[in-house]
Amino acid sequence: MNINDRAREELYKQVNELSDEQINQKPAEDRWSIKQLLQHLYLMEGAVTKTIQSQLASDKQNLAQDKPIELTVNRSTKVEAPDFAVPTEDFATLEELKAKLSATHEALRHLSESTPEEQLEVKSYPHPVFGEMNLKQWIPFVGYHELRHIEQLKEVKAQLHM
């Protein structure tokens, strides 16, 4: 969870001084607002946690080679968000978003700390870019995914002169 915690700290550093109006502002019609980026992050983190839990509950074992998940931060390859992680246009406050981000982060932390690594290593779940990924790698993947979107968030702030 080290990369996850560092990413979350950086994420909060980037948004803590912004107003609710600022985070809901879009830089362009076809671009996400900061609110939408934050919503995408908690939707993704929550979905990964639930997926790991469901895979752990199954009897199926499937070994997968380690993938270069650190490449997730490379934004030269555009990846479409899966339907379950597409944010809404609804207005939300920073306080609401941070509460949801905190809840999903703590759920992933609890799962990570309460599950033996051996169990995470012998089960896998497919990733749309990396292919079959062991459950152990899915945990830091969330942190790298967040770092990727922090770069996007910085671009949105610059475009909106924040």
Image: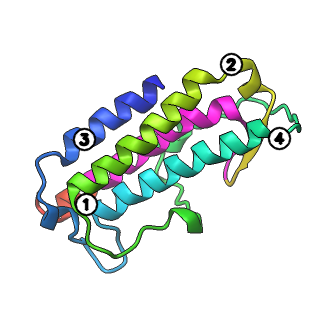
Label 1 to label 4, Cα distance in Å? 41 Å
Give how far across and how far down residue 32 sits, in percent: 34, 68
Visible in this render: residue 132? no
Locate the C terminus and report the quarter of the image it occupies: bottom left
Q: Is residue 13 left or right of residue 58?
A: left
Return the x and y of residue 150 as percentages of the image width and height: 34, 47
Which residue lies under the disc numbered 3?
12
The prevailing secondary structure element of the residues shown in magenta is helix
Is 122 included in the stretch rendered in magenta?
no
Q: Amino acid at mark 1?
A: Val
- Report the magenta residues as a range: 129-154
N-terminal-most mark, 1 or 4: 4
In the rendered structure, which amino acid carries the disc numbered 3?
Answer: Tyr
User: Which residue in the protein does label 1 denote?
Assistant: 156
Circle 2 residue: 116
Query: Contact (CB < 8 A) between labels 1 and 4?
Result: no
Labels 2 and 3: the sequence-earlier one: 3
* Eye-nearest disc, 3 or 1: 3
Kind of element beneath mark 3:
helix
Q: Which residue corresponds to the image point at 72% horizontal and 29% vertical from the top-left?
A: 66
Residue 29's place in the image compared with 80, above or below, is below
Q: Position of residue 135 (x, y in %)?
A: 69, 34
Question: Identity of the amino acid at label 4?
Answer: Ser
Local SS, label 4: loop
Viewer-proximal residue among 141 and 69: 141
- The Cα atoms of the two marked residues, 2 and 3, are separated by 30 Å
Is 125 placed left or right of 58 in the picture? left
Q: Position of residue 62 (x, y in %)?
A: 86, 35
**Label 4, on which residue?**
58
